[in-house]
Amino acid sequence: MTVTTQRASCTLCEAMCGLVVTKDSSGAVTGIRGDEADPLSRGHLCPKAFALPQLQDDPDRLRRPLVRGADGELHEATWPEAFRRAAELLAGVQREHGDDALAVYLGNPNVHSLGALTHHPTLVRLLRTRTRFSATSVDQLPHHVVAHALYGHQFLLPVPDIDRTDLVVLVGHNPMASNGSLWTVPDFPGRRRELASRGGRLVVLDPRRTETARVADTHHFVRPGSDAAVLLALVREVLVSGRARPAPWVDGVDAVRTAVEPFTPELAERASGMPADAVRALARDLLDAPSAAVHGRMGASTQAHGVVCQWAVQLLNVLTGNLDRPGGTMLTTPAVDLVGRGVLSPGGFSRRRTRVRGLPGFGGELPVSALAEEIATPGEGRVRALLTIAGNPVSSTPGGHRLDAALGTLDALVCVDFYLNETTRHADVVLPPTGPLERDHYDLVFHLLAVRDTARFTSAVLPKDPGGRHDWEIARDLGLAYLRARGTTPRQRLSRAALALEARLRTSPTRQLDVLLRTGGAGLSVRRLRAAGPGGLDLGPLRPRLPGRLRTRDKRVDLATPLVLDALPGVLAALEGAATDGLVLVGRRHQRDNNSWLHNAPVLTKGRPRHALLVHPDDLVAHGLSDGERVRVTSAVGEVVVEAAASADVMPGVVSLPHGYGHAREGVRMRTATTLPGVSVNDLTDPGVVDPLSGNAVLSGVPVTLAPAEASQRERV
């Protein structure tokens, strides 16, 4: 039997790992291994990549459109029928209630697909709605708010130069499981070993002894929601030392010094549990290290002080002289510079706010924590139709059970997805795209966040399923059907802007990429990348780019951001008055998970179940519970029943539950034999509680109580 190999890209997470795929003479995939020639991933592969062939052949995966019939059930339909029905529904709602009565939600997988990135934003613009949501406000919006405030663009996100640093400090960050997040760092285990081999250190601050904390030189437990106290105390100590060394293009240091003076290490200890002496020692280490990098992720963002935390992280790198230097935190020089070319929105707060609570919009999007209430609350401006693209917000956003109920009241729901899940089960039309192995790929976004500058284009490993549609083809055909439904078919009736959008929808992703490469200044093209050989092109290590890459008006960085400085007195009061007793809930991630999906891939669901509630043994005893017992977990907005697992990996007073497990809601078609049992943490998170500065969801530090599963309401602890 003839065996062939083909290089490919894994698109399941932010790591952009290069693959070598083996196929037999029939074209079937027979093996996957890491591409050792790839200059970024260097042969690394995590277990998720081995699920790619199973995703391709998954019997749960939808391959034809579904349209809800007169009987109330979803039935297979032809593509023309599905596009026509979807367009009529969306356009009909807008004709009756206005353009903004249609909401759009973009899920995380959009940034993992070349066609989605080139075509879905165009489709959304064509729909003319300002009611836009995305997964950004679930977990990363504070990063973008701070990047815009300090550097002038929401996607100027410095990343740790781990390959050359002497000290890495990670706050609420678990790259051993995630391969990096807003930090494309494939082969983190190998890079951590290389850090140790040259005498470097890894320090982790986290309320759980995560996979990354276990390989750290030092791990400090930090109570969820208190990271701001520790980070601001570190900033204060750096400034008090008199050894701060910001770059000459940095302003506002004196104003910051005054603002952070009350945030002492002693306050940090009271709020977080991290000893004051340990805070002072870490500040000295950051100043003494030849190079150092601080990075905060989910745990630092998904809390009430998310923007303050990310601001403090940036200040630590700036004030220790580690921003924009080898071994510190650096900006990339991507072959396709979406920031420099103005393709990506620079961000910024808008005057548009959510209708019910008045939460701020940022970068043209509204906080997704408000989606359920915007649907359910009667009145002028109510959301009456929703288009979701590659997202499952019932599972992945706060108060999932509330959104689950709200979706059933919509006049129209159209979903682009290849699964029936907690969200798409409500749909009037489901439009399933091709799978990852069937698409050409180039990472437009994650090259902005990578630890090394590279460029790699890979062709589809498998032919498109007969009769299938790529995501960009779905965007194109839905957009054209929408124009017909709006009564704008004749070209003379389209505005110049609409004509440009229509033309862009008709242009393939590869052609659009080629234009971006040819005009990007690096002298590249799709043809050159195809011929580049194993691993693509290595464009070298990160190099200093500031102040030239800044997008601020004066090409300077002002640390004294009014948004944050004005909020610090309230943050101080909140930290001083915060309760340190009782239980608080955090989420967690596993290397074999991918947010809310991959839980039905047999190769990933083998072994011990991963859905249990982790509870410190002392807390089990205090609540009269035992290891393995089914417990009732209750928050201000909901309750779930789940098995408890004793674990000293969580600090006392903290419990941990993942999200996206169970698929237990009626109508979700997933194979029970390979679906992990369990419940979702987002049935306990409160959409009414957000970071007040950004509107980002608060998923960490949720107050909960525990009781035996059979306990009555009166008996709950």
Image (cartoon, rainbow, N blue to C red):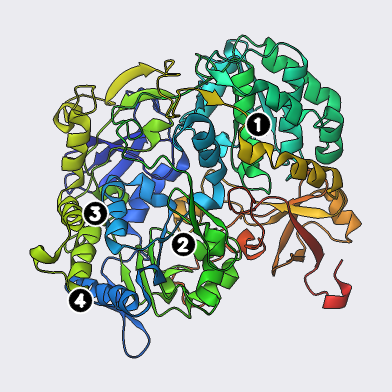
- Name the residue at the bottom extreme: 71
> In the rendered image of this protein, does residue 230 appear above or below residue 208?
above
Amino acid type at image mark 1 = Ala
**Labels 3 and 2 touching (C-beta < 8 A):** no
Which residue is the site of mark 4? 81
> In the rendered image of this protein, does residue 336 appear above or below residue 523?
below
Local secondary structure at mark 4:
helix
Local secondary structure at mark 3:
helix
Looking at the rendered image, the quarter that the C terminus falls into is bottom right
How far apart in space, not on screen, are marks 3 and 2 (Cα)? Answer: 19 Å
On the image, the x and y values in percent for residue 596 come to 50, 56
> In the rendered image of this protein, does residue 715 appear above or below residue 501?
below
Which residue is the site of mark 1? 312
The reply to whether residue 665 is visible in this rendering is no
Local secondary structure at mark 2:
loop
Q: From the viewer's perspective, is the residue at label 2 or at label 1 nearer?
A: 1
How far apart in space, not on screen, are marks 4 and 2 (Cα)? Answer: 24 Å
How far apart in space, not on screen, are marks 3 and 1 (Cα)? Answer: 39 Å
Which residue is the site of mark 3? 472
